[in-house]
Amino acid sequence: MVRSSKHRFLVPVLGLLIVGIIFSGVVVGVNFAQAESERSSVPSVTVYPAVAELHAKTALVLLGSGFEPGEELTLLMGDTLGVLMDLGASAGFLDPPAVADESGNFVSKFQVGRIERISAEQAWGIIVMDGAASEVLATAPMAFCDPQGRARRAPYPRGAPDYEKNPDDPRPAPYCQGRPEFEYPEKPE
């Protein structure tokens, strides 16, 4: 009789074990499917052109996708030193303001304008945050080239590079060098 009592509990325990394995497989499959769907709609942003001349009249186009429909976004521009500038509604640099459409996309024009005065030839980054500016959703690199020396904040005197007067002028930056759209004077070797 002792043997039959052992087998009596073995079948339900094995049954529960099999149900547990099937249930965990379903849960893992659902989580994997959710992760796959989330990965296909990861927010992203692109800047066009990614390398532009530092000039008040320069206009950049910011293209974003994968955001929540109707979501108001905060856009910041950050330099290599960690200084951030708000491009959004309070600053008025974006036309139209960055709000995701029903497909989760946005397109906005960014006019450099007065940022020319506080910028320099360097790499920058566009940072897209949620409306409350509490979470970074996407980033994109960009750069300004300054062949005419329009920047007031720079390690070189204002004006186009004059390598005779200032042989240590760091312009052009590596990402500006050799690009036909930016005309820098020939740097002596």
Image (cartoon, rainbow, N blue to C red):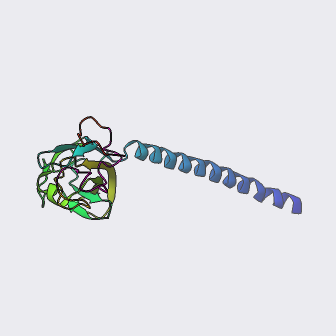
Q: Nearer the viewer, residue 179 or 144?
A: 179
Viewer-side residue, 8 vs 34: 34
**The residue stretch that appears in magenta:** 159-178
Place of residue 67 in the rendered image (x, y in percent of width and height, measured from the top left): 29, 48
Tell me where residue 4 sits by quadrant. bottom right
Image quarter hosting the N terminus: bottom right
State whether the magenta stretch is mostly helix, strand or loop.
Answer: loop
Residue shown at 23% from the left, 50% from the top: 161
Image quarter of residue 187: top left
Q: How many marks?
A: 0
Q: Is residue 39 left or right of residue 124?
A: right
Decide which of 9, 163 is in the foreground and name it: 163
Q: Is residue 122 visible?
A: yes
How far across and down, in percent of the image, does residue 41 sit? 37, 44
Q: Residue at x 83, y 60 (%)?
A: 6
Can residue 124 be spotted in the picture? no
Residue at 23% x, 44% y is: 52
Vertical side of 118 occupied by 103: above or below = above
Task: Looking at this view, name the residue that lies furthest to the top.
Answer: 180
Tell me where residue 61 sits by quadrant: top left
Q: Residue furthest front?
A: 164
Camera-side residue of 143 and 102: 143
Residue 40 place in picture, x, y as percent: 40, 41
